[in-house]
Image (cartoon, coloured by chain):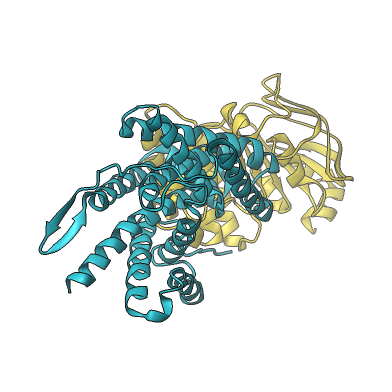
Chain colours: A cyan, B yellow
Amino acid sequence: MNDFLEVLVVGLGNGAIYAMLGLGLVVIYRSTGLLNFAQGELAMFSTFIVWTIWNAGVPMWLAIIGGMFGGFLIGILLHQVAVSPLGDPHEKPLAVVIVTIGLFLALNGAAQLIWGTVDKRLPPLFGTGQVTIGGVSIQWQKIGSLLVLAAMVGLFLVLFQRTKVGLAMRAVASNSESAGLCGVPVPRILMLGWGLAAATGTVAGVFTAPQLGLGTNLMQLTLIFGFAAITLGGFDSILGAVVGGMVVGVLSSIVPQYVSAFERMPLAPAFILILAVLLFRPQGLFGSKQVQRV
Amino acid sequence: MSLLEVESLRCGYGIVEVLFGLSLSVDEGELVVVLGANGAGKTTTLRAVSGMISAEGSVRLNGREVLGRRPDQLLASGVAHVPQGRGTITALSVEDNLLVGAYQRKDSEVSADLEMWLEAFPRLGQRRNQQAGSMSGGEQQMLAIARAFMSRPKLLLLDEPSLGLAPLVTREVFDRLRDVTQRTGTAVLLVEQNANLALDFAARAYVLEAGSIVASGPAEELQHDEAIQKAYLGL
């Protein structure tokens, strides 16, 4: 039983990371209506920025804020240089998706050039200590990741539901042309979406790096789990990203433990989940169904 | 000086020219209609004026050249555009749609205006929290108009509000529109195929054919013009 609980806790901790990355994907989806394949690499790149600042002797939490800010600027820059010149993503979705795949490769290459191919060590934000509750030992880092995730969700819910910028982002996602006619500066809103997504990714990267080691392929597997998370939760739902992330995290830590066939293919549960959701409930658990009457 | 002056407007899509040097004007608070058949260039005219597509010529607002600006910049100068097909932001609620309409406003009367428009369009008031995309065509058209008024425009560009609506619903839309323009003193540049309704509504009219203005004058005069009656009124 304790074994099961420990695997469950590991799953929840991983799930929190998938959810964080998923949040960044949801933010981009909410403003552009598209999946951003570069989300993971953006997160990896800004995690390296965190490492660079921390390595220079700055306290970790300050380094993270620096990395988020750096990620924000890089997200904005990439949008302005590579995405925005294509025009409205709602009119040319395929071109923009292909560009995000290109950015995936470019960011990965750039990170290798700057930081080399040897993994760096990034210590866990909440230390290596653990606490034992009811016979189950839980790392502080796992508890910390859940708390940070909760804080991020709170901030995003306020942003989307209570602020004017959030309203504008939702409007642009649903109908960018109309939003523009209503006075929303569409290019600026899209740019902001990219910046926010990249900053969000930084946090996901900072929690992933201590587990996997900080290398340039840090987020590549995580991105697949992130996709699975938001597919399950619904591409446009903040809460969906969280619930989806948790389910995916728990599934991919428990299933290989009890079904030997999955031991050697840890990604399989995530893929099966994506497939099943797309088949039976394409809008995900919490996603909004497209409603249109003519 | 007119509120809106359009002079020798030329534009097209790719190599296809749609407008051949179109000129028209709208005075402050004036209700003007551009009549024309399918493909005459009505929608293109509005899209060029509000900056949705690029065009040559001149578009002046209170004497200032505004051609080449983006729609959101034009809105800041007081021009709201209700596009063909109503432009409903389908995923948002009725209330949120209206609030997006007030995006550029910084004053404190936005929520008062919201209540006012929900009252002026009772059908919207009943559906305040409903997802806008799930409403009927007539309701979405009223939402589009109310949303445009949320920006407190000086000039409303209105693209074929009757499109796809039943005659009774169209009449209701026009009745509401007449009420609110009277109340707010907003000028309207309407493009329509439904000449009967449009000439009843407007004070002045232009007739657009194949990208050029072929006739213009007071709406009442055009209503009794034989050629117009034949071509547009089915008399």
Drawn side of residue A9 relative to residue A112, left or right: left
Q: Position of residue A128 (x, y in %)?
A: 24, 47
Is A235 drawn above or below residue A269 in the view shown? above
In the image, is A181 to the left or to the right of A49? right
Along the horizontal axis of the image, is B19 left or right of A290?
right
Quadrant in which residue B57 is drawn: top right
Quadrant containing the N terminus of chain A is bottom left
Quadrant in which the C terminus of chain A is drawn: bottom right
State the image coordinates of residue A8 (x, y, percent, origin top left). Answer: 26, 66
Residue B161 in view of the camera = no
Residue that protrudes farthest toward the front in the picture: A118
Residues B222 and A246: in front is: A246
- Residue A107 falls in image quadrant: top right
Q: Locate residue B107: give its quadrant.
A: top left
Residue at 50 percent of width and 72 percent of height: A278
Name the residue: 46% across, 72% down.
A265
Residue B193 is situated, as x and y percent measured from the top left of the image, at 73, 52
Q: Position of residue A23 (x, y in %)?
A: 41, 51
Evaluate whether residue B225 shows in this view: yes
| Vertical comparison of A82 with B162: above or below | above
